């Protein structure tokens, strides 16, 4: 029994190391309206300290930075989700906070993406991305909790709430996913944002960064969990 526990702990320790992507469910499942939690917030946090996703019944946007998780509700309110809250979709990784890339000039979202593509040219390797800094503009969205039978994701997004922030300090977290991952996740870049004062955040539709520190982690292993753990 003790030995089993030791192996289980070791397994979690390996999974949580930097360089591993831990993903809950798939984008395709979300597209089909599968919004019931697969694992809990507490379980998800065992697999890394940074990430993004959503919550049971598609109740808002998840922003997970440095071990602290935030939930932006459909009306834009930012709360900390309870540990037992269900998670139907999320991507989590550890990002080593070393070898920071300093952003010194104003850079819009396209320039931000091209900078990353220029530095990380192997498009087959997923990237986890974290930036702390100041932003002259951030446009985010969130969505309200859905009632079963759940509508497909495109129908929910058609009614998304959009919020604009200006001259705002905060944290950006996201991923670059390879084309071959289509269906499992959205190829390309996906960012979520939370302000430093934790009053503003969501799924990033557009942004312009003024400056800050950027940390990138290449993810060379991936774990996908699909089933409810009961
Ligand atoms: Zn998102």
Image (spheres, rainbow, N blue to C red):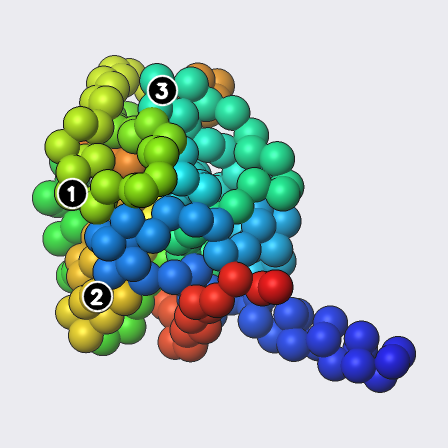
Q: Nearer the N terminus, badge 2 or badge 3?
A: 3
Read off the residue under disc 2: 183
Residue drawn at x 31%, y 42% is: 149
| Residue 106: assigned label | none
Residue drawn at x 34%, y 52% is: 34
| Residue 132 shows up from this direction | no
Side of 157 relative to 56 (left or right): left
Read off the residue under disc 1: 154
Q: Are marks 2 and 1 in contact (CB under 8 Å)?
A: no
Query: Residue 62, how many percent across, how many down?
Result: 42, 39
Query: Residue 129, how many percent across, how many down?
Result: 35, 52
| Residue 76: assigned label | 3
| Residue 156 shows up from this direction | yes
Q: Are marks 2 and 3 in contact (CB under 8 Å)?
A: no
Mark 2–mark 3 Cα distance, whole angstroms, equals 28 Å
Dot 3 alpha-carbon crowd within 10 angstroms: few under 14, some 14 to 19, many 20 or more = many
Dot 2 alpha-carbon crowd within 10 angstroms: few under 14, some 14 to 19, many 20 or more = some
- Name the quadrant of the C terminus: bottom right
Query: Residue 163, how many percent across, how many down?
Result: 25, 19
Q: Give 102 or 149, whichever is nearer the viewer.
A: 149
């Amino acid at each position: 029994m003790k030995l089993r526990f030791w192996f289980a702990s070791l397994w979690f320790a390996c999974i949580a190391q930097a360089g591993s992507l831990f993903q809950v469910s798939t984008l395709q499942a979300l597209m089909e309206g599968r919004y019931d939690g697969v694992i809990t917030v507490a379980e998800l946090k065992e697999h890394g300290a940074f990430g993004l996703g959503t919550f049971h019944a598609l109740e808002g946007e998840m922003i997970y930075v440095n071990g602290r998780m935030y939930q932006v509700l459909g009306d834009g309110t930012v709360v900390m989700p309870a540990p037992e809250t269900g998670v139907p979709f999320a991507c989590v990784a550890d990002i080593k906070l070393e070898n920071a890339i300093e952003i010194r000039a104003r850079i819009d979202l396209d320039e931000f993406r091209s900078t990353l593509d220029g530095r990380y040219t192997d498009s087959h390797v997923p990237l986890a991305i974290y930036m702390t800094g100041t932003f002259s503009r951030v446009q985010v969205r969130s969505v309200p909790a859905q009632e079963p039978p759940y509508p497909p994701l495109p129908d929910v997004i058609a009614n998304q709430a959009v919020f604009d922030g200006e001259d705002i300090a905060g944290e950006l977290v996201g991923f670059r996913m390879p084309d071959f991952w289509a269906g499992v996740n959205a190829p390309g870049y996906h960012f979520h944002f939370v302000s430093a004062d934790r009053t503003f955040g969501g799924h990033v539709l557009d942004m312009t960064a003024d400056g800050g520190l950027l940390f990138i982690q290449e993810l060379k292993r991936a774990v996908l969990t699909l089933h409810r753990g009961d």
